[in-house]
Image (cartoon, rainbow, N blue to C red):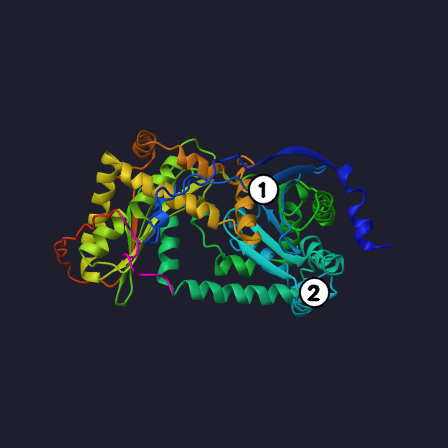
Amino acid sequence: MDKSAHIFGPALACFAFIGWLSASPAAALTAPVAFPESRLQSLSETDTTRQSPRPLTIQGWKTTTGIKTLFIRTTELPMFDVHVSFASGSAHDGDTPGLAAVTFSLFNEGVSGKRDHAAIAEVFDGLGAKLGMDLDQERATFTLRSLSDPDKSSPALQLFTQMLGQPSLTEEALLRVKSELRGLQLAQQQQPAEIAAQRLQELLAPDTPYARPLYGTDAGLTSITRQAVQAFHRQTHSASQTQITLVGDLSVEQAQAISLQITNALPAPLVALPAVEPPKSFGIEMHRHVERAQEQTHVLLGQPSLSRQHDDFVALYAATQIFGRGANSRLMTELRHKRGLVYDASIRTKDWAGSGLTSIALQTSPQFANETVALVKSMLSNFQREGPSQEELDHFKRGLANTNIIGSASNEQILGRLAEINRHHLPLDLDFFAQQVQRLTLEQIRMAVDKHLSDDQWRVVTIGPTVQQLPLPQPAIVPTVEPSGHSCRADAGFVAS
């Protein structure tokens, strides 16, 4: 009997569908008007905020054990991607810092005593499959990319599910993983960006699991036993703690069967670990300096943000991106173009502590560190009062519309976006976020900034030498380039070669 037929046969009865939605229809692109015969037409005349609908239908179901699965079928390439996520990040360590990282790292060290790390890698390579692993404070994630051919996919999926459900977790592998994690701890302690991120978490959520290093502590690693790892695996990697996302050249029945195969391989549900409570309050220490002899001072500002499910998330996200994302943002215009204080400055919003964290990272000369921090805070305070301009909002909308199309060109990109929908229980539509952005008004953004972005709540971490501070250089006048009526066009007589 063909193994793929056996696997993909009776799976449908084991699922309860939770429904599916396709991307909402959008208007077709508007053609440029009055195309001049002697000029190259600028793409800026196309309304990029109006997008054609894409044939990407999200389908979803739950297995009988409660695993939520989302799936998008794509047929351009004969391959598929599987994303399996567990609520087993480092915030779930309990009283043993490093327990989640150790357990996570043991998954590809051996399977049921039959294969070690090298053998696992050899099998995947021989099948043309690719394994991915990622750990954060909230979740542990495992991905598999495989060819759709059953002769390749069947053994790849078998090994993948064995890794998730039957890792060998040997004493020998445990010692090896502990040594590797200690090496990662030492490496992080030498990287200013990693030091700053860790200190910021300590400022924001002291005495909570969210203030601990991702890879634990030396004392925590020392205390971890094989029995503790086995118990953690059973508690946090059972079906009740799992989300599955699939994208690629599969039928619905095949995708259902894969999710069932993964479900059946996982440990039987036990009493789950208690949910990690997000911080009820945040630390009162506002600034921490770490002394290091280096040419540049690393600066990191941060404050709590909103969860993806919050009604104001989209408006606040748009505000922060307008303020600090891109070469022509307010932040880069003032710090780099006018004053030459930084090479780059970036703003980021990420999942953290059950909600979110917004941070601004930059590097500057040590003698300007304090005044640069003061300038950024002043700019943020002004932005809180004024909000963005209509021109800035329109520019952000155009950029997001373009990114929304480009960011779903490959299976890997689609998988990442679909996994975010799965993780945060968002509407089943890849275009939903982009459509929310296009509907934003200045008033919505100003209200969100006023409610959720506090100019007195920024925690600041600086990493660098202590030197005499100097006043900032005076800002230069940055010339404003007025857009011409024929942007990006060649004069008559010029042609593309």
- The amino acid at mark 1 is Pro
Q: Is 52 located above or below residue 413 in the figure?
A: above
Residue at 18% over, 53% down? 371
The secondary structure making up most of the magenta span is: loop
Position of 462 compared to 231: left or right?
A: left
At which x and y percent is residue 351? 45, 44
Q: Nearer the viewer, mark 1 or mark 2?
A: 1
Q: Which quadrant of the figure contains the N terminus?
A: bottom right
Residue 75: tell me if it is visible: yes
- The amino acid at mark 2 is Leu
Q: Which quadrant of the figure contains the C terminus?
A: bottom left
Numbered badge on residue 129: none
Task: Determine the secondary structure under disc 1.
Answer: loop
Sort mark 1 into few (<14), some (14-19) or many (20+) by Cα contacts within 10 Å.
few
Q: Is residue 493 magenta?
A: yes
Sort mark 2 into few (<14), some (14-19) or many (20+) by Cα contacts within 10 Å.
some
Numbered range of the magenta stretch:
486-497
186 or 223: which is nearer to us?
A: 186
Q: Which residue is mark 2?
A: 127
Residue at 63% over, 54% down? 229
48 or 115: which is nearer to us?
A: 48
At which x and y percent is residue 360? 32, 50
Q: Where, by quadrant of the figure, is residue 395 drawn?
A: top left
Q: Which residue is mark 1?
A: 55
Residue at 32% over, 51% down? 326
Q: Is residue 345 magenta?
A: no
Position of 93 compared to 167: left or right?
A: left
161 or 286: which is nearer to us?
A: 161
